[in-house]
Image: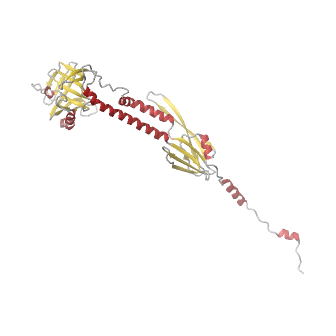
Amino acid sequence: MVESSNFWESVEKAEVPEVSDTSVSNNKVEGELKYESRPHQEISSRRYSNRSLLLVVFCIFLLTAPFGLAGLGIIGGREDLCFGTFEYLEDEKLHCVDGSESSNLIYSSSENHVSVTYTEGYLEILRWEIIGDGGVIGFAYDDMNSDQGYTWDCLRVVTKSPFENTSMTEVTQIEASIILPQWCYETPKFPANESIEQVLPFNGSAVYLYPNGITFGSIDLLQYSEDSSRYQMISLHTYNEDGTLSEESEEDGSGIRLLAKVAAIMYYILFALVVYVFSSGRTYIEHLGTENTLTISTSWINKPRKRKTTIPLDSGSALTCYTTTSMHTDSNGHSSTSTSHHHNITHLSRASVALPDGFATDDLLRVTGLELNRQ
């Protein structure tokens, strides 16, 4: 007969399973790290604030307003105004002439230049050369920025009058074709020996320079005569006896005024489009919801967004808010201080990621679901 074991002995011999503390700890950590999906969150902000855009628009308008408004004919546009005197020229038409004339000049001619002494006491040294239907006149001046001292300031001139069987188109072509002679780039030399024979610049004839416009503009006149010199600015358009523009000039100017208005309108339309494009720029920060990830994207003119950055989040991520202070000193020595607020996402084991400016801290906390860490 087999001897039966005692009940309590069976109980004592039964293996009791051991509970691992590590397993419990791991399950607990995995429970803490497990991400629970949340509703999709999104915030957006303008890339450029209304205040910044208004400031830029105001500054540009101040700079361009005189030209734009003149082009539109709102201000200016009075071509009939003449601040000089009305004179009949070679074309037997009335022009507006403004300028100055000096008298009682004393000329001193040398080998390659002419000295002109004015009654006011100052001396002018010049050199001239005729080239075809044009020429060059150079004025000697002391160049403080040059090691050579004196240098020539050469100007192209036209010897044919635009008011006597010569069109402004031809005058412009003559001026453009003139090649400056070599002496314009050399250091002026003033020989001591003076010529007995007095030689006037361009032999006393008038020359024309700075042609501006074809039929509706102005041109300058320069002439040295026996004992005087004159420099005049002459209108290309003509006038009636009562000071109003002639019918011919009105017709010539109408096309130019129309082009100026079209140019001004096109400029402001283009400017408005540029402002609209910049005002439409937006930056988006969104939490995907189904996964613990932030995305940063941008868009212009309501076009599809373009993703710029993706930021994975974890239990070690936090939202950090910090401020920066900068000091500016103007030309008068006055100092001003400005403070700006910024945000970034910090991680325990990864580098921090900066967030775009323009978002409030409360909005960022809501969309990210993170804790705030102030610095």
Which is nearer the eye, 120 or 47?
A: 47
Q: Quadrant of the C terminus?
A: top right
Judge left or right: residue 369 versus residue 5. Answer: left
In the picture as drawn, the residue positioned furthest to the bottom comes out as 1
Q: At x 79% / y 66%, what residue is drawn?
A: 16
- Residue name at image x 45 percent, y 38 percent: 275
- Point 59% across, 41% down: residue: 321
Q: Is residue 189 visible?
A: no
- Residue 246's spot in the image, x, y percent? 25, 25
For the N terminus, the quadrant is bottom right
Image mark count? 0
As drawn, the residue found furthest toward the left would be 196
> In the depicted view, which residue is nearer to us: 271 or 30?
271
Q: Position of residue 7 (x, y in %)?
A: 88, 70
Q: Position of residue 371 (x, y in %)?
A: 64, 45
Q: Is residue 86 above or below residue 283?
A: above
Question: Residue 20: where, in percent of width, then height?
Answer: 73, 62
Q: Nearer the viewer, residue 231 or 40?
A: 40
* Colour basis: secondary structure
**Visible in this render: residue 219?**
yes
In this rendering, position of residue 238 left or right of residue 111: right
On screen, residue 238 versus residue 46, left or right, reads left
| Quarter holding residue 366 | top right
